[in-house]
Image: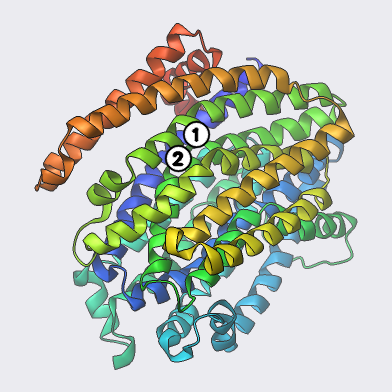
Amino acid sequence: MTIQGKILRSASVITLVTLISRICGYLRDQRVALLLGTSPTADSFVLAFRIPALMRRMTAEGSLGASFIPIFTGYLRNRTRPEAWDFAQKIFWDMAVVLAVVVLLGVVFSRQVIGLFTVLSGNPMHWEMAVTLNRVILPSIFFLGLAAVAGAILNSFHVFAIPAATSIFFNLSFIAFSFPFLYRPVLRLLPGHLQTPAVALGLGILAGTILQLAIQIPVLAKLGMKFPVSVSVSDPGVRRLGRLMGPSFFGMGVYQINLFVDTLFATSSRMPAGSIMSLYVADRVMQLVLGVYAIAMSTAILPTMSHQLAAGKPGEMKRTFGFALRIVSFITIPAAVGLVLLRRPIIVVLFQHGHFTLESTALTSNALLYYSLGLPAFAAIKLITPMYYSAQDTATPARVGAYALGANVLLNGAFLLFAFRYLSNGSPALASSLAAYFNFALLFLFFRKRYGPLGFRGVASALGKMGLCAVAMAMVTVATLNVANFAGVGHVLAQAGMLAGMIAGSVAAYLGLAWLLRCEELFEFLLLVRRSDAAVAGETES
C-alpha cells in the first residue's frame, strides 16, 4: 500500500470512530443545554469544564503526542524493545506525579483559578458555583493525562482505533449522569448546596476520564508494556521529551488557549448573560467538522512524517503534508460555508429544547458565524504543526503561537471596546478566527524559509477549484433558504427533515461541480469512504 493509501486507511479508522464520538458528544452537549440552557449556572459549568478539556486537547490531541511519538518511534527504530518500553514506563509514571501535583494545587486554590478567568466580570460571587464545580471536575485531569500517554504509545504502533474510541466512553458516561434516575440517588449523598444537575454532570466527567484510561491499559499490556513504578527525571529520553514538550504544550494548544482568552472576554460585564455557554456550543458545533477529519488526519500523519524524516526523506514528508492539506481543505471549506449560511437552522434543530430558548439560539448562532469563518485555518494548523514536531522543533510553533495569542488578545480588546455594538458575543469568536489565519500564515512561511518550497502551487490550484465549488454550493444554499419557510415549521422532526434536505442539496451541488472539474480530492475522499469499513476491521485485527 502507498504512503497516501496508508494515511487514508489510518485516517478513515480515526474518522469513523471519531464520528461516533462526535455524535455522542453532541448528545452530551444537547443534554447540558437542555438541563442548564444559557443560565449563569451553565456559564459556571462551561468555565469549570474548559480546564480538563484544555488538558485533553493539548495532550491527547496536542503536545504530548507531538513530542513523544517522534522520540518513541526513534527508540523503536534504533534501540531494543526493552529499552523502548523502559522509556515509555518512565514517561507514564513521571506524568502521573506531575498531574497529581497539578490536581492537588488546582483543588486547593480553586477560587484563585476561577478568579483568574473571571477578572473582567467584576462580580466574584457570580462564580461561586464555578469554584465548586472546578473542585469536582479538576481531578479528571489526572486520568486524562495518563490516557494521553497511553494513546501516544498506541499511535506509535499505528493503533488508532482504541485511543480514538476512548472519547466515546467518556461521552456515554457524561450522558448517563445527565438523567435523573442516575444522578438523583448520587446527589442525595452530597450536601444540600451540591445537589444540582451541574454537579452531577461534573461527576459524569470524572467517571468518563477514568474509563478513558482503563480501556487502554489492557491493549498496552498486550503489546508488551509493564507497569512497575519507575520515576526518573535524569533519563536522557525523559529530559529530551521535557525540552520538546514545554514549547509544544503552548504551540500545539494555542487554539485551546485562545478559547480560554475568548472565555475571559466573554465574562465581561458588557457581554450578555449566557455568552460563555453560547461560545461553548458554537465551538462544539464547529468541532463536529474539525474533530471528525482534521484531527483524524493530523493524528494519522504525525507517525508517518516522523518515520519519513528519521529515514532521511524530507521531500516525502512535505508531500505528505500537501496531500493532507488538500484532502482536509476539500472538506472544511464547504463545511465553513454551510455553517455560516445554515447556522440558525442548525442550532434550532440541535439544541433549541428545554432551557435552551430562542434567545439562546440567537446568541449561539451569532458566535457560530464567526467561529465558522476560521474553520479552514483551524484545520490547517492541525496539519502543519506535526511537520515541525516530526523534525523535533517545538520552539517555532510555540513562538508563533505566542504571536497569535497576542493578536487574539488585541483583537478581543479592540472588538469589545469599538465593535461590540455590531459583533456582540461573536467578538471573541471572530478574534480567534482571525488569529488562526495569522498563526497558519506564519507557520507556513517559517517552514518554507527553513526547508524550502512545500509544493504549494499545486495546493493553491486545488484550493481554487474548491473555492469555485464552494461558491456554487453557497448559491444553492441561499436559494433554498429563500424558498423554504424554516421559521414557519413548528415541529422539530419537520425542521430536521428540512435541514437535512438543504444540507443534501448543498453537498450535491459542491460534489457535482467537483466531479465536473475533476477535483482529485473528490476521488481520494470517495476512496477513503469505501475503505472505512475494511480499515476498521483491519485495525481491530491488528
Q: Residues within 10 Å of mark 1 (few under 14, many from 20)?
A: many
Q: List the residue tagged with mark 2.
A: 289
- In the image, residue 332 above or below residue 372: above
Considering the numbered disc 2 on the image, is that residue within a helix, a strand or a loop? helix
- Quarter occupied by residue 306: top right
Residue 174 horizontal side relative to residue 269, left or right: left
Q: Where is residue 130 in the image (x, y as percent from the top left)?
A: 44, 81
Q: Is residue 51 visible?
A: no
Considering the numbered disc 1 on the image, is that residue within a helix, a strand or a loop? helix
Q: Where is residue 393 in the image (x, y as percent from the top left)?
A: 83, 46
- Quarter occupied by residue 298: top right
**Hey, what amino acid is under mark 2?**
Val
Q: 87 or 489, which lies in front? A: 489
Point out the image quarter for the N terminus: top right
Residue at 54 percent across and 88 percent down: it is: 111
Q: List the residue tagged with mark 1.
A: 332
Residue at 30 percent across and 31 percent down: it is: 478
**Hey, what amino acid is under mark 1?**
Thr
Residue at 73 percent across and 44 percent down: it is: 69
- In the image, residue 532 above or below residue 167: above
Colouring used for the render: rainbow
